[in-house]
Image: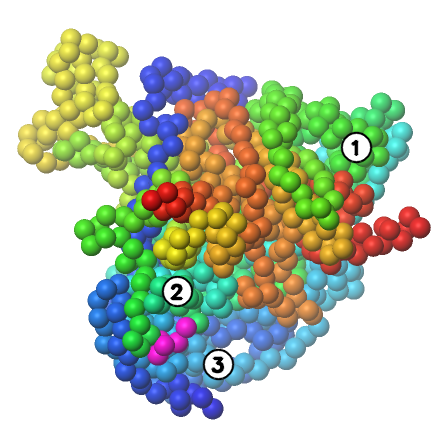
Amino acid sequence: MSSAAGQRDVPVECAVNGRSVSLTVRASEFVIDVLRDRLGLTGTKRSCDVEVCGACTVLIDGRSVSACTTLAVELDGTEVRTVEGLAAADGTLHPLQRAFVKHGALQCGFCTPGFLMTGYELIDGGVHDREDIRAALDGNICRCTGYVKIMDAIMEVAQCGQMR
Amino acid sequence: MTNLQNGIRLASESEEATVSDFAAVGQPLPRRDSVEKVMGRAQFTGDIQPAGLLHAALVVSPVPKGWITRVETELARATAGVHAVITADDLHAPPISCTDTRYGVVVRDRPILAADRVTFVGEPVAAVVAESRAIAKAAALEVAVEVTSEEAATTLDAALEPSSPLVHPEPFEVEDAVYASPLPLTFGKSNTGLVFETARGEVEQALARCARTFDASYRFPAVYQYAMEPFTVVADARPDLIHVWSSAQHPSYVARDLARMFGADLGSVQVSVPYVGGGFGSKSFTHVEPLAVALSRKAGRPVRLELDVAEAMTISRRHDAIARVRSGVDGNGRMVAYDLDIAYNTGAYTLLGPYIVAKGAFRGLGGYDFEHYRVRARMVFTNTSPAGSMRAVGGPQAAFALESHLDEVAIELERDPFEFRRGLVASKGAEFRRGRTLMDADLTENLTRLEGLARDLDAPTRTHESLGTGLAMGVADPGASPVSSAVVRLAADGSLTVLVGSVEIGQGVSTVVRQIAAEALGVRCDRVAVRPTDTGYGPYDASTGASRSTSFSGLAVYRACRDVRARVVAAVCAEWACDPEQIHVDDGVVWAPDGRSWEVGECVRRHYGQNGGNFYGIGEVTGHEFPTTPAFWEAAAGVARVGVDEETGQVRLLGYASVADVGRVVNPLLLTGQEQGAIVQGLGHSLYESLEWEQGYPLNDSLLEYRVPRITDVPDDVLETFVENYGGPGPFGVKGAGEAGIIPVGAAIANAVTRALGVRIRELPLSPERVWLASRNAGRDDR
């Protein structure tokens, strides 16, 4: 059975939020465990464990993935960005973070890191159509807000980008 | 009567505040916690990492009902990285040394670990502590639980049969409860543990006299709250202090249970609540905290027990229900008799069941002033996971029956649904429930406001969709246990720290009490800090839920700030020899009429004669202040507009308009968020959500199979309006909010679907299969 293979240690080198990281990971280990337990980046949240809810969304080479089902070995040679890497080094919030604060696009805040990362990918990619954005956010669940204010916040930033 | 005195006292408190312009209350301030939440810096229980932390995993019952014959733990114990494996046999012996192994809200029926009998799939039987969660979970799979299965009662229908096997043949010790059961529970005769009845007039005789009578049955699904943070607890049981971090909505209650079960003083138990990743009732009362403490005592180290979604689903859920309504109208088409018989599936353990069915009974009457009514609400045990609290407990189930039924009757009588309800609702000030608080909302006005707002719902339908619009109301008797306290501390620099027992679960209590505190003392919001709830040093609060945080915790904070303000005013009056009535505190500065001023911190510094020091203020709200219940009525109503694809049975929500009576809006940004959240959570049980079991085995215990509303399910047209009549018992006239909005959603959507299809579906959720079948069968009947 694969448990023996899963126990294998694999060296991984990647950049996390702009910092280079060298790790030895288990072949069976998931990205979420590396981020939360080894790197102390607890902003990435665990919820459904089956890549449905999007709470653990991070960007690997700019693309959003669910950290709960992505194997840590796949991080080798990549650039990872988590919610902790959204604000500038001096603490200035990213426009998307500011929009979430302004619009009240969060309540308990557990889904927020995931929404921010998916939203960041969309804005970074120049997506600005309301229905395109809504469709792309289908993989992020929020149980508190009813989504209305999340749409408002992301649309505001997407449309600003459009005007620039 | 006493209620009036109450009104006068509260009016004077809010009157004082209404004279000045509000600097803080009523403002759309961003959440206090939003910056750390968007930065990923907010700490939740699963982010707490004491030195030496170990991780736990559960071993659970594999069957719905049976007797444990053997629990084989040797293999798990021998696994590398495993520190301990415990079963019920270990609980009384040192080092765990439980003084009691059972707990519960109303009766102590819940064991920490099942000792002999198991009563549902997922009931904890053993637990493993290991170096990591992965090791603990793998080792848990090595524990063999041998059970002799017994015939179980796994559905509400089956459990109600007279011949059904009994879930609980014997009684349990009654908890000396904050939440007293309205009636004693019965065990051993049937699975119906309690029948709560409330009535007025003579419903049977009235029905016999009615010009027309109606009779229909309705079904509501079991619903998983899905707080996105699955229940998590960290326990560090040291010799002198049991310290627990828990995503708990009722930390005071948890502390009380732990003290009793582990032979400790309340002063030696500390329950700290970091940010909670959603609650919706799922984290109400004690869940797995006693198990985590037992594991920490056994391992001699801090232990984290982080449930996954499948496990969290077995912690708490909303009761599924079956309701039968019989009603009658007189010759003028006025409904004069209403009889509701509703059975709630409370699962294998009682939790808050008795309280929930009693709440459901009243919520099943709505705000209507029926001449003759009777509700019988039954709490029924089954061998399924325990049902507990969920947003507006008992309400959505009963209101789905009530409001669907009213719609059916209105259609039969060819009456407009708004007009039909306007003729039935209790008028403001009416004693519409004997012995309870008078109706404090203007429901007629609410309906008129909603009717106007609903005209703005104009989202286009797709060509193949049939369009329908439906109305429903919801009236709740909230404010469970109006007991709160607060401590505030004014520092020598003029900043204020608020300690409050209500937990920040996302509802925004820490922002709202900040606004209330700023207003009550006369300081800027940004000078007010609100600390996380902690029973170790913070004040007592009965609970976080039942729409009570803004009203009751808010009132305690208001009073604590007025207490501090009185000290500040006394300090300047002693110095300046002026009348306290003439002192004005604004923006952190205390002003005398002649223009002399100190900033508030100056009062503290002068009092102590140093640069440091604190003024403490204490605020209390006690149950004695509210001689009648509820402390306020929470009223909402909603209109849903849906599109139904008759080819596929798919229902889309195209728009929703809601109205809520909130007394006064403290923070419109947060309040609209609460209301939108309630509507979309209601959309879940209306169209998608239903926990299913096959012979007691869970069928959809994963988010892959259990579908909750997504962003693509929510239309742009979600409109809400709030009625402010300043009539609430909270500071500045606030009532609670956040719950009533979910009550009407199910019936509003079902009524809309009926109007789209011309066929009535009396069971939620309105899944494509259910809608398609109903539509097809109706078509056949027509032919």
Q: Residue at x 46, y 17 (%)?
A: B8
Spatial CA distance of label 3 from label 1 is 56 Å
Camera-side residue of A120 and B639: A120
For the residues tagged 1 and 2, is the chain the same?
no
Q: Is residue B619 visible?
A: no
Q: Residue at x 74, y 44 (%)?
A: B466
Q: What's the CA distance linking mark 1 and mark 2?
A: 53 Å
For disc 2, the chain is A
Identify which amino acid the numbered label 2 is placed on: Arg
Q: Find disc 1 in the rendering and name its residue.
A: B410
Q: Nearer the viewer, residue B745 or B502?
A: B745
Q: Main secondary structure of the magenta part?
A: helix
Q: Residue at x 35, y 79 (%)?
A: A73
Residue at the farthest top position: B594
Tell me where residue B214 appears, x and y as whole percent.
Answer: 84, 38
**Vertically, is B411 above or below B664?**
below
From the viewer's perspective, is the residue at label 3 or at label 1 nearer?
1
Mark 3 vs mark 1: same chain? yes
Among the two numbered marks 3 and 1 on one chain, the one whose residue lies closer to the N terminus: 3
Quadrant assignment for the N terminus of chain B:
top right
Q: Residues within 10 Å of mark 3 (few under 14, many from 20)?
A: some
Q: Chain of mark 3?
A: B
Is mark 3 in CB contact (under 8 Å) with mark 1?
A: no
Q: Position of residue B626 (x, y in %)?
A: 49, 29
- The amino acid type found where label 3 is placed reads Leu
Question: Residue tagged by mark 2?
Answer: A63
Q: Is residue B17 left or right of residue B338?
A: left
In depth, the one of B356 and B779 nearer the eye is: B779
Say whether marks 3 and 2 touch (CB < 8 Å): no
